[in-house]
Image: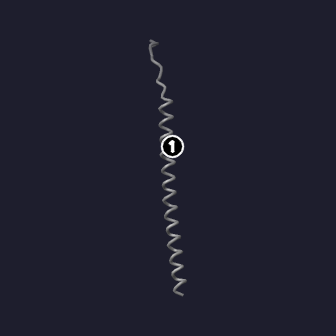
Amino acid sequence: MRNDNRQPAPDFTQAFLVTLGMILFMSFWTIAVVAGFVWVLLSAFAIDRAILIGARLRRG
């Protein structure tokens, strides 16, 4: 018994590509935020150390 009245599968290519684009955008945004946060931490630490070294050199 064959069922020849079957409907073709719906095409979800467009929905998949839109979702993939959104996921990639959010992933790259998260990577940029984390990298920026690490950069700020390293910069703040370096500036703090430079100020402390400068203060020690002034005191003699």
Density class for disc 1 (Cα within 10 Å; few <14, some 14-19, many ≥20) is few
Which residue is located at x 48 percent, y 51 percent?
30
Kind of residue at badge 1 = Leu
Image location of residue 40, percent across then percent down: 50, 62
Image location of residue 9, percent across then percent down: 47, 23
User: Which of 11/34 is in front?
Assistant: 34
Q: How is the image coloured?
A: one colour
Q: Quadrant of the N terminus?
A: top left
Q: Answer with the quarter of the image where residue 6 lies.
A: top left
Reply above or below: 9 against 19. Answer: above
Farthest residue in the bottom direction? 60
Which residue is located at x 51 percent, y 86 percent?
59
Farthest residue in the front direction? 58
Which residue is located at x 47 percent, y 32 percent?
15
Q: Quadrant of the C terminus?
A: bottom right
Label total for image: 1
Reply above or below: 33 against 11. Answer: below
Reply above or below: 34 against 50. Answer: above
Image location of residue 10, percent across then percent down: 46, 24
Which residue is located at x 49 percent, y 35 percent?
18
**Residue, disc 1:** 24
Image location of residue 29, percent across then percent down: 49, 49
Numbered disc 1: secondary structure: helix
